Image (cartoon, rainbow, N blue to C red):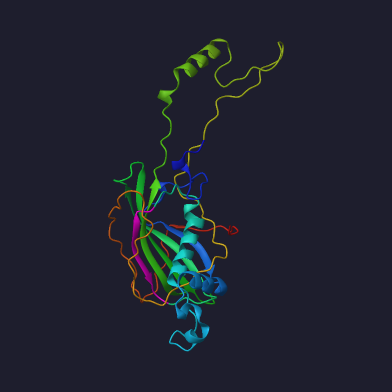
Amino acid sequence: MTTPDARSGTGQPAELFFEDLVPGLTVDLGVVTVDGDEMVAFARRFDPQWYHVDPELAGASRHGGLIASGFYTVSLFMRAYVDHLLSRAAADASPGLEELRWLAPVRAGDRLAVRVDVMGARPSTARPGLGTVSLTGTMLRLGPDDRPEQEVLRTRFRGWFALRPAEADPSEADPAEADSAEAGSEAGTGPGIAASGPAGGGTAGHGPSEAGAAGSGPASVGPAGSGPAGHGPSEAGAAGSGPAGSDQPESGPPDAHLAETSPPGPARPETVSPRAEPHA
């Protein structure tokens, strides 16, 4: 039976563990297209400032039209992160958020490429059995040719992930099972061999099966469906507190990040590419 520590963030059996999230790894979280109706509905419910909800006022302003709430944008980043990484990783809670910056306005119809980079990883001192992973998430607006035009969101945060479960030690086998195997060997039917049918027939069975070792490398991550992404007007970074875990947050190593005005460099060489899957 799958233990809670071996489940992914969505409750399915985990495939990725702390040991797989090595510094330098880049995970492609797919591309999302901003849905105008959803963008405005979110703002009316959670951030009803005029440049998010009033087309006339926004159109006559320096914004030139409605722009998305930054909290809508980061919510869409979170959905892509869950769909394409946490859905497969043995994820626990998050001890916090170090940076959240909205670097450019986002509008209806924008196509945003989403990714997360692993910046650091170390065993947790507050939560035995877990490791703390430092991550940088980015969203980049794509042009008509699908080339990145501008970085619109950057966030730095940490997550707790379960360590890979240790394999059972063969020397710790149940004594009762060992006695049973020895008795079977003396009767001429070695362990794992099943006798077949009546006297005069042959024996049919199979030897002990070999369990495959679990792979340590991360597998491909499925792409985002059609989840939109939006963005707020402020170009100043807000320090977010993020969803805190139940224990004290740990201070992670300082993370270098891109300059606000320069486009991001090429993707890191080790990249996990998405696979096409429908959005839930």
Q: Is residue 146 visible?
A: no
x and y percentages locating residue 28 in the rendered image: 48, 61
x and y percentages locating residue 195 in the rendered image: 64, 17
- Image point (53%, 71%), residue name: 41
Q: Is residue 60 above or below residue 174?
A: below
Q: Of helix, strand and loop, which mostly describes the magenta segment?
A: strand
In the image: residue 11, left or right of residue 119: right
In the image: residue 12, left or right of residue 20: right
x and y percentages locating residue 114 in the rendered image: 47, 65
Task: Tell which residue pokes out farthest to the bottom in this image.
Answer: 60
- Image point (34%, 57%), residue name: 96
In the image: residue 238, left or right of residue 276: left
- Image point (36%, 45%), residue name: 130
Which of the pair 115/246 is nearer the observer?
246
- Image point (46%, 64%), residue name: 75
* Number of numbered tags placed on the structure image: 0
Q: Is residue 217 above or below residue 212?
A: below
Decide whether residue 204 is among the magenta residues: no
Q: In this picture, which residue range is highlighted in magenta?
A: 94-104
Q: Image quadrant for the C terminus?
A: bottom right
Decide whether residue 100 is among the magenta residues: yes
Q: Is residue 89 visible?
A: yes
Which of the pair 114/209 is nearer the observer?
114
Q: Is residue 4 above or below residue 140?
A: above
x and y percentages locating residue 250 in the rendered image: 29, 52
Which of the pair 203/81 is nearer the observer?
81
